[in-house]
């Protein structure tokens, strides 16, 4: 008796028997990826299987490297994934918009069977559509069929209790279509297989990067009688779906550049179309009769034919060149990624918690390697101590929030641990009691940070502002532009009241403003936004701290826009040089002459306007008296007055012309003085 075993069952059994490579090393970073190394023994001819989530495959294909202690790896296989749109485009129908009528209408010509109550109707699909509802009839779907008898029949799809396609191939296509939709929504595992055809056992190592939760750091700062103690804890989450059993765990502080490349889904490129030009159909040729037969004129026709053929060959070659497919670029070799980390023994301060992490610089990054193997079950998290040692620090106060009258209790920490301290929250304990909490950025070795963890209600700070009038510091001129540099002084007085009966140290942060410079006090240090002054506060005492600042700015003014009286203010300024004063004095005198000339012009214009008005009045009087008998003597008097006024107007016009001419000369001389103004 022969038994039939499906090929799919054989492949499934082979996959189940594939060798498993357990996780041996995990390196977690702060930018959302983790490095994983698996290793195990691979028997002769055996394949190893690595399971990943579909979302991880892009990173796996970008970073996977394989190492072997002996023998050769023949290749890697993995479950492929074609884009859903490309898969569905292969089917003769699409399920979606249009509902059932829209889908059936795409299958015109396909045979279908419908159950209408106890009746079964079979035929070939002609068309299907949805009719909109009316007042008399609701919306309904109709299917038009051609029955086996040749009769056309319209079927109400809403009345059908079932339908099927007798064509087994079409039925299978529907199953495959729906299966493709389900697979696209599936989050099931994807497998990578490592194949080998060697005839001996060997050790295989697989390394790769996949998305992983970032590890988090948390600190405890403990103040006591001696130097402060800093404890560091790492919070690690295992969301990989499998247990980490006795793995070598490393935690790296830093953020290398990482990105996602779409390598898993097959990529298709649209190719250009290239077609040969269609040869036109040959037309009938009517040959004319010859008038005369020429002898010895052969050979020309052959040359013409040869030229035509040559041209045709060149066109064919160009067409073939356009149609030749582009050669694929050689595949890039997968880069090797190894995390060989040397261990070194760190001094551990005796405590109830033992920090077992060894820290070392890793290029521009810093690594904490947990000395003992770590076990974290799937979907569980762990807190691992990676630091515990004394650190250089002191308690003080910081006044940085100028909207509050109280400073904050703070600590100045200098990283004397020799390690990089990853950023995270710090819980502060003082004299065995909870004192507050703070946040700290990543702190490199030997660097210093201030942290604030509570409000100090025993210290009050008030601020008072003052300023002085701006003074001219410098005066310069260049080609008619006068530049004056001003200096304005401002003061801010801090009044600090320490009501506690103990001495304190205060760090006062004063805003660093662009354009302002300090005049008196010297800060202990400066940040990007603040000056930091350190003050020693006596017990129960009040003291003032004054910060003087100066702002220097300049003002550019065109000399032509300044009047002579305004120029006097600059002439009296001590910052003006002798040469500058002499030049400005000449300009001021010239402007004053121009002003006097303008006043003379205005006076002449006013006199002319008055005389013109008198002349108009006299002319009206003469016109009215000419019509009255016995007024000839008065008319003669008005005529003599009008003549005198005309002589005065003529003299004023001459004076006005002279004044205008003088003004032009004065203005030209002023323009020359202004243009030459430089000091």
Image (cartoon, rainbow, N blue to C red):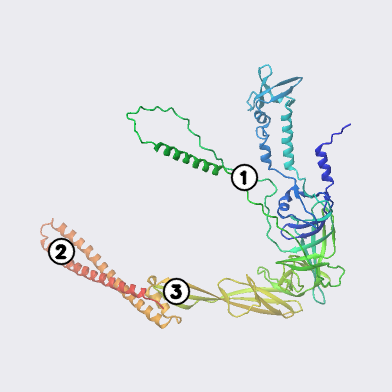
Using residue 147 as the reference point, say whether residue 295 is left or right of it.
Answer: left
Residue 100: x %, y % from top left:
68, 30
Q: Among all residues in the image, which is located at the extreme front?
A: 296
Instruction: Give the image quarter of residue 368.
Output: bottom right
Quickly name the residue at label 2.
638
Which mark, residue 480? none
Front-most of 275 and 663? 275
Tag 2 and tag 3, C-beta contact below 8 Å: no
Which mark, residue 483? 3
Residue 216: x %, y % from top left:
76, 61
Q: Nearer the viewer, mark 2 or mark 1?
A: 1
Looking at the rendered structure, the secondary structure element under dot 2 is helix
Front-most of 119 and 552? 119
- The residue under the point 74% across, 51% down is 56
Front-most of 213 and 224? 213
Instruction: Note whether 538 is above or below 376 in the view shown.
Output: below
Looking at the rendered structure, the secondary structure element under dot 3 is strand
CA separation, marks 2 and 3? Answer: 62 Å
CA separation, marks 1 and 3? Answer: 66 Å
- The residue under the point 54% across, 38% down is 275
Q: Nearer the viewer, mark 2 or mark 3?
A: 3
Front-most of 627 and 461? 461
Q: Is residue 222 visible?
A: no
Instruction: Note whether 128 is above or below 405 in the view shown.
Output: above
Instruction: Note whether 631 is above or below 409 in the view shown.
Output: above
Looking at the rendered structure, the secondary structure element under dot 1 is loop
Quickly name the residue at label 1.
269
CA separation, marks 2 and 1? Answer: 108 Å
Q: Crowding at label 3, few (<14), some or many (≥20) Cα neighbours within 10 Å?
A: some
């Amino acid at each position: 008796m022969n038994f039939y075993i499906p090929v799919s069952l054989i492949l499934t059994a082979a996959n189940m028997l594939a060798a498993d490579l357990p996780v041996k090393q995990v390196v977690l970073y702060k930018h959302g990826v983790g490095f994983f190394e698996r290793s195990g023994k691979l028997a002769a001819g055996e394949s190893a299987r690595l399971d990943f989530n579909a979302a991880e495959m892009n990173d796996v294909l970008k970073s996977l490297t394989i190492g072997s202690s002996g023998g050769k790896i023949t290749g890697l296989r993995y479950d492929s994934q074609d884009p859903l749109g490309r898969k569905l485009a292969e089917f003769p129908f699409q399920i979606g918009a249009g509902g059932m009528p829209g889908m059936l209408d795409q299958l015109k010509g396909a045979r279908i069977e419908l159950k209408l109550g106890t009746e079964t109707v079979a035929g070939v699909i002609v068309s299907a559509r949805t009719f909109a509802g009316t007042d008399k009839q609701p919306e309904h779907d109709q299917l038009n069929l051609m029955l086996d008898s040749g009769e056309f029949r319209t079927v109400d799809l809403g009345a059908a209790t079932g339908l099927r396609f007798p064509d087994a191939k079409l039925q299978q296509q529907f199953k495959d279509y729906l299966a493709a939709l389900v697979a696209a929504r599936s989050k099931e595992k994807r497998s990578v297989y490592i194949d080998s055809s060697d005839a001996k056992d060997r050790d295989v190592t697989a390394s790769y990067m996949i998305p992983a939760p970032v590890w988090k750091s948390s600190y405890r700062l403990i103040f006591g009688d001696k130097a402060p103690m800093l404890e560091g804890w790492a919070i690690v989450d295992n969301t990989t779906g499998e247990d980490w059993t006795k793995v070598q765990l490393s935690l790296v502080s830093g953020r290398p550049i990482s990105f996602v490349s779409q390598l898993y889904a097959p990529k298709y490129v649209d190719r250009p179309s290239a077609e040969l030009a269609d040869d036109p159909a040959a037309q009938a040729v009517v040959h004319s009769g010859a008038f005369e037969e020429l002898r010895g004129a052969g050979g020309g026709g052959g040359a013409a034919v040869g030229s035509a053929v040559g041209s045709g060959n060149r066109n064919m070659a160009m067409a073939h060149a356009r149609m030749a497919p582009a050669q694929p670029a050689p595949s890039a070799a997968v880069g090797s990624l190894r995390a060989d980390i040397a261990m070194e023994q760190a001094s551990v301060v005796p405590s109830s918690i033992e920090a077992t992490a060894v820290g070392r610089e890793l290029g521009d990054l810093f690594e904490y390697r947990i000395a003992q193997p770590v076990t974290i079950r799937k979907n569980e998290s762990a807190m691992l101590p990676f630091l515990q040692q004394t650190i250089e620090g002191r308690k003080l106060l910081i006044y940085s929030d100028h909207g509050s009258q109280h400073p904050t209790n703070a600590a100045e920490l200098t990283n004397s641990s020799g390690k990089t301290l990853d950023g995270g929250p710090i819980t502060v304990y003082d004299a065995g009691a909870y004192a507050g909490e703070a946040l700290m950025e990543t702190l490199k070795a030997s660097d210093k940070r201030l942290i604030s963890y509570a409000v100090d209600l025993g210290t009050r700070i008030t601020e008072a502002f003052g300023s002085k009038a701006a003074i001219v510091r410098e005066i310069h001129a260049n080609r008619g532009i006068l530049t004056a540099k001003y200096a304005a002084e401002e003061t801010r007085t801090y009044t600090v009241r320490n009501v506690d009966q103990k001495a304190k140290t205060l760090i006062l942060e004063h805003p660093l403003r662009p354009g302002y410079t300090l005049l008196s006090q010297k800060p202990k240090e400066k940040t990007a936004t603040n000056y930091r002054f350190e003050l020693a506060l006596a017990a129960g005492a009040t003291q003032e701290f004054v910060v003087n600042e100066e702002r220097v700015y300049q003002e550019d003014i065109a000399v032509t826009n300044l009047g002579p009286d305004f120029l006097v203010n600059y002439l009296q300024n001590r910052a003006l040089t002798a040469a500058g004063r002499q030049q400005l004095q000449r300009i001021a005198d010239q402007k004053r002459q121009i002003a006097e000339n303008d006043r003379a012009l205005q006076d002449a214009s006013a006199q002319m306007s008055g005389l013109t008005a008198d002349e108009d009045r006299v002319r009206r009087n003469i016109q009215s008296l000419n019509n009255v008998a016995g007024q000839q003597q008065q008319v003669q008097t008005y005529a003599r007055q009008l003549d005198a006024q005309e002589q005065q107007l003529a003299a004023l016009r001459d004076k006005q012309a002279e004044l205008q001419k003088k003004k032009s000369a004065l203005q030209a001389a002023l323009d020359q003085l202004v243009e030459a103004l430089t000091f």
